[in-house]
Amino acid sequence: MSKQKPAGPYETVATVIAQEPAGAVAYCLTLECPEIARSARPPQFFTISCHPLTGDGADGISLDPLLRRPLGFYRLRPEKGEFDAVYQVVGRGTKLLATLKPGDRVRVLGPLGKYISPKDVNSQTVLLAGGGVGLPPLYSLAETLKDAGKEPIVIAGARRRETLIAPTVPRKLKRPVGGRREVQSLEPFARSDIDSVVALEEPEDGFFEGRITVPLKEYLEQDYEGGVEIVACGPPPMVRAIAGLAGEKSVKCAAIMESRMGCGIGACQTCAIKTTSGYRRVCVEGPVFDSKEIVWE
Amino acid sequence: MSKQKPAGPYETVATVIAQEPAGAVAYCLTLECPEIARSARPPQFFTISCHPLTGDGADGISLDPLLRRPLGFYRLRPEKGEFDAVYQVVGRGTKLLATLKPGDRVRVLGPLGKYISPKDVNSQTVLLAGGGVGLPPLYSLAETLKDAGKEPIVIAGARRRETLIAPTVPRKLKRPVGGRREVQSLEPFARSDIDSVVALEEPEDGFFEGRITVPLKEYLEQDYEGGVEIVACGPPPMVRAIAGLAGEKSVKCAAIMESRMGCGIGACQTCAIKTTSGYRRVCVEGPVFDSKEIVWE
Amino acid sequence: MNQERGNKTAEPSLEIGLLGMKMRTPIIMASGTFGYAFEIARVAEFDFSQIGAVVLKSVTLEPRQGNPPPRVAETPSGMLNSIGLQNPGVDYVIRRYLGMLKNFDTNFIAGIAGDAIREYVECAGKLAAHGDIRAIEVNMSCPNVKDGRRFASDSGAAAELIGAVKKGCRKPVIAKLAPGTGDIQEIARACIDAGADALSVSNTYVGMVIDTHRRRPLLGNDAGGLSGPAIRPLAVHNVHLVYQAAARRDVPVIGCGGIMTGDDAAQMMIAGASAVQVGTAVFTNVHIAADIAAGLGRYLIAQKEKEVSAITGTLQLNRA
Amino acid sequence: MNQERGNKTAEPSLEIGLLGMKMRTPIIMASGTFGYAFEIARVAEFDFSQIGAVVLKSVTLEPRQGNPPPRVAETPSGMLNSIGLQNPGVDYVIRRYLGMLKNFDTNFIAGIAGDAIREYVECAGKLAAHGDIRAIEVNMSCPNVKDGRRFASDSGAAAELIGAVKKGCRKPVIAKLAPGTGDIQEIARACIDAGADALSVSNTYVGMVIDTHRRRPLLGNDAGGLSGPAIRPLAVHNVHLVYQAAARRDVPVIGCGGIMTGDDAAQMMIAGASAVQVGTAVFTNVHIAADIAAGLGRYLIAQKEKEVSAITGTLQLNRA
Ligand SMILES: Cc1cc2nc3c(=O)[nH]c(=O)nc-3n(C[C@H](O)[C@H](O)[C@H](O)COP(=O)(O)OP(=O)(O)OC[C@H]3O[C@@H](n4cnc5c(N)ncnc54)[C@H](O)[C@@H]3O)c2cc1C
Ligand SMILES: Cc1cc2nc3c(=O)[nH]c(=O)nc-3n(C[C@H](O)[C@H](O)[C@H](O)COP(=O)(O)OP(=O)(O)OC[C@H]3O[C@@H](n4cnc5c(N)ncnc54)[C@H](O)[C@@H]3O)c2cc1C
Ligand SMILES: Cc1cc2nc3c(=O)[nH]c(=O)nc-3n(C[C@H](O)[C@H](O)[C@H](O)COP(=O)(O)O)c2cc1C
Ligand SMILES: Cc1cc2nc3c(=O)[nH]c(=O)nc-3n(C[C@H](O)[C@H](O)[C@H](O)COP(=O)(O)O)c2cc1C
Ligand code: FES
Ligand code: FES
């Protein structure tokens, strides 16, 4: 990768290449959009129109819903000019996204927000903790960290195995934890030879039992020669719990935050969240914040 | 067919069976909806939601556009519980209809409006004159009249052959007109062994040249033993021209009128058009009106 | 009976009492979109059981031919209408239409409109005398007739109108307010002082669509009233404002504007409505009341509420 | 030059003159949705050439932290916002942001807001002194601050405010009106009498969305301002009303509300606008001005008009 500062975000039209279910509750959308695929760096995000554009012009057919939806990057394939995003159907916008089919064109803006540059990560080991649709962005981040010679370890939490965004496979951990050597690991990370463990609230063999903080605690009790820090991404209560634990243990924690957005690019102050230094925009100052700075409400 | 008065209109959900281009500028939509397919009589119409319904409930995903679109019946297949409607893409609603695919479910209300009962048609010969998307409803009407022992003859008008809703085939007319015996006829009518002639504004072999009134005049100069009358359906200026000619020749003419609609069922007074006896609702007192009663604006 | 029902099932009750009417649901069909009930009742298997009441299309003393077409213009998530109160006049309506109401198992409210107070009063008197009419809704705000908004924009005129109608009729009187015409709380208070038994909030918002091709308004009458989901956030806010003024006086508010779903109806009720009116949504589905009722029922179960009336006015402000 | 261009091409001209500004198109980016221009200018290949002017986000004398989140609620074909005028204060804006304006090839108008007239005046004076600021737009109507609508709902207060700003600043002053707060024609006349050089019509409409699950308003600030296509028919109507009041006095009207396409812009201009503002649409496409300009150009060709200004106020009423 070049050392240049990534070019400004792009406002452009992307083409849907594929759309597949991802686990039982989510979809994986593949978009062709070379500008974004080449310049995006995790955990940046992009925004996407809910309606496909009509054949003849730039405007969609329907004006409702109006706003674009922010999504993170799951896999980036800069060489192919493509990327994948995984999303969960929660409301009308994501319901519409689920109706997109190959060939449809959508309006996109991205990459947006700050990224985590491996060279700014001081610790050698990074615990990537998250759940739900927070896991896919951690995938692209984990790859980036690994490519830069860091040790990413993924810690996932879910209610049941079925609500995980990805299938699990048995894996022998490189770095055993809590006395366990062989656990169920998330398949995409395993394929990239990245350790991952999963905590389920409904107990099952090969998984940790309880909230995500259960395995996270175990990890934080280990020794890390090159130091350790956390990146948290997932449902806000989970991120908050992770941040809380990090605070107790005095481990640095980056929280990837969500917020309702207008412009996505810093112009409207819509996406403000409360921090110790006042309101901060998730789309510009975020989505990554030092968890110590977040004022949880 | 039973002699019972058709049952009241149905508010229900229809399933899209097929959607195909009809000519260069229109689409033919096949819907499964037994209630409507069995009770509709031409030239009644139905209204259709622009957005398909979502899997889980009765509501569509998008609220824009909001209103249903009125469409006529092209072919009715009561035994299969299906019918076809042909429509042209003119605005946002029809653009959305064009994105419907087999399996989609849409909200429909119909059949609506008055129909033409063959036994109320006093003349033996009925000249069905129209153009554009006015032709498909004339098809189901022609079939009904023919089944009842009447002689329907179709007269179509279009700018060019390419803007016709259906292909043409050479046909030997049962009742020659204007000295012509063999002309280009509309394929669907020919298949049902119903005479049709076409007037094109851009001249071509086998077609009348000029507006629809050119062949219509020729037909009105012939003698009809059992009497003759006209049904006009198409773009308002065409219907008006046909009505004008009918007036000059003192031939009875039924005009099938269009109007923007709210309820489609007589409750809101939205679809009023001006008649000699005040405002009348296209959705209840129409869509068929005696052309003499229309106050053209 | 009631007790038996209460024991048999844990289903929450949608029943409410309003102006002496027992309503099976808080869902009222709004004036002008449901005609005089018989038109839509023709739909096969039409079911009134989830409809709490119907407000009949506004009637005037004399017949009105209405406005020139087109009378509807679609807008983003909404529509403008400019019907112009077309109706055959109060005598004809009573003679020809009201007799059919007894076939339909719900409550009926008559809607009235007019230019002069005298017309309103006479109209109300005639309709109120009919046994199947349970209340009178005064359309103070039709945007589609000349000077139509006067009564809704001036609290003095509003009070005079409502006071007069109230005096001339022995059935409950509902004042139907209009939005965007000044301080809606002040108008609401004036109507209450004048004796209004309930307030409907609200009618449509005045708008215009221009046909750029012809450089003329699309509607024959130039401007029209905006209805449908587009106005829902405005209507919810106005209901909340009026509720603040009316609750203290124990006058029920009926919420109206853009309701399509059970959640929309719940929003209105939480904001302060005792019942809701549904207009434009009927154009998307004539059975919409049943869908809304089902949605409301599911909402009450999720909220562990036994009675729909328990949610009225329960809004907690974030900044309180 | 001009002649040469006139000969070379039959393309209609989108150029207009407004308040002494030469604008390449009548499209103005609305206040609050385009920040201080540099944020959106970061987008790759961002092009100002189809933007006639930008109104910078409203600035106040002192920094404001704005309202608690969430600050946006999506609504059918629209959105509510409750930003609450978050801004770093006029001095910071001048020191840190205005210097960048010279990099962007368009006209800039400063937006100002405040509580007291004194604040507005001081703010306007400081901004007007900046060479790259061509005019001052007075936000008389922010629905998201306490008492925010006072200046827009009372013609006396409006006149006082505009008169004071006008006196304290040597650049043209635009009064940005608010809808739904009384007789908008009367307010418009009051602003004109007080010296307003142009009128923007209009700001957002107050609305509320309720989170039924929590029975609380979705917005942290409870209510917010409705913008986007949902309000377009209302805005077009208000522009037409204000134009009737302002045209006689030769004061230009700037139309604003729900514009997404060239046809929408044409509607506003036909209704009486000399220029249009585009806000929410930027959230759907940051290059929207170019699309709207292209649409307007096609419209002028179809209408055989050579100059976009020729369509301003050409509405023919059906009922005239
Ligand atoms: C930086 C960022 C990255 C994200 N990455 C992903 C991802 O990779 N996969 C994924 O599934 N989801 C992601 N989300 C959340 C996703 O944007 C929301 O789930 C989605 O916008 C919901 O839209 P909807 O129309 O289905 O829901 P509705 O509730 O109908 O949406 C209404 C409005 O609220 C907004 N909204 C609702 N929920 C959220 C939310 N949690 N965050 C932000 N806005 C919201 C919508 O954008 C819309 O404007 C991300 C959010 C942010 C801010
Ligand atoms: C009784 C009847 C039968 C019809 N049968 C057919 C048919 O078989 N095939 C066909 O192609 N068209 C038919 N039409 C016309 C068809 O309804 C319109 O072309 C269609 O509604 C346009 O919708 P849109 O969203 O594409 O256009 P838009 O212009 O975006 O629509 C805006 C609004 O205006 C209404 N509208 C626009 N044009 C018309 C019109 N000509 N008539 C009525 N409403 C209109 C729409 O329904 C919508 O509410 C019929 C109309 C009527 C009244
Ligand atoms: C076509 C139409 C006709 C209407 N006619 C009347 C009327 O006659 N009297 C009246 O009080 N309101 C009338 N209204 C207003 C509705 O009763 C209702 O107040 C308004 O449409 C807002 O509710 P909605 O968004 O659910 O439609 C009419 C509305 C529409 C759409
Ligand atoms: C997020 C947001 C912030 C806004 N902030 C301001 C503001 O600071 N000052 C102002 O005068 N108007 C503000 N507005 C109003 C817009 O300038 C515009 O008047 C309104 O949104 C209607 O236009 P639209 O429908 O094109 O968005 C804001 C609008 C939005 C959506
Ligand atoms: S979404 Fe506009 S500033 Fe963040
Ligand atoms: S569309 Fe409602 S009466 Fe005809």
Image (cartoon, coloured by chain):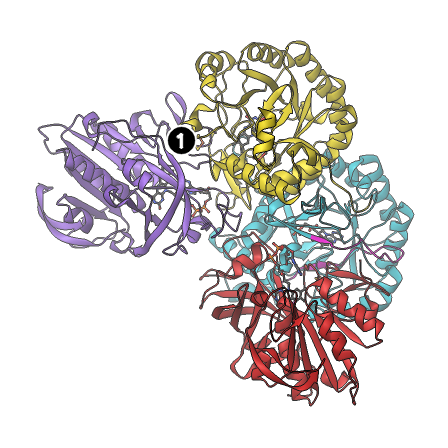
Chain colours: A purple, B red, C cyan, D yellow
Measured as percent of width and height from the top left, residue C39 is found at 72, 67
Q: Assess whether residue D51 is covered by the magenta stretch.
A: no
Q: Nearer the viewer, residue D178 or B23?
A: B23
Q: Quadrant of residue B279?
A: bottom right
User: What residue is shown with label 1?
Assistant: D43
Asked if residue C67 lies in the magenta stretch, the reply is: yes
Is A217 drawn above or below residue C306 in the view shown? Answer: above
Is any atom of residue B59 visible in this view?
A: no
* Type of the residue with mark 1: Val
A107 up-or-down from B47: above or below: above
x and y, in percent, of residue D320 in the image? 83, 43
Q: Residue C207, percent across and down?
A: 70, 43
If the image is split into quadrants, where does the N terminus of chain D sit? top right
Secondary structure of the residue carrying numbered label 1: loop
**Does the magenta stretch mainly form a helix, a strand or a loop?**
loop
**Is the CB atom of the residue marked by disc 1 within 8 angstroms of ligand 5's nearest atom?**
no
Dot 1 alpha-carbon crowd within 10 angstroms: few under 14, some 14 to 19, many 20 or more: many
State the residue at coordinates (36%, 39%).
Answer: A46
Where is residue B141? Give x, y as percent. 66, 79
The magenta stretch is C43-72
Chain ID for label 1?
D
Q: Let me know if residue B218 appears in the view.
A: yes
Question: Disc count in the image?
Answer: 1
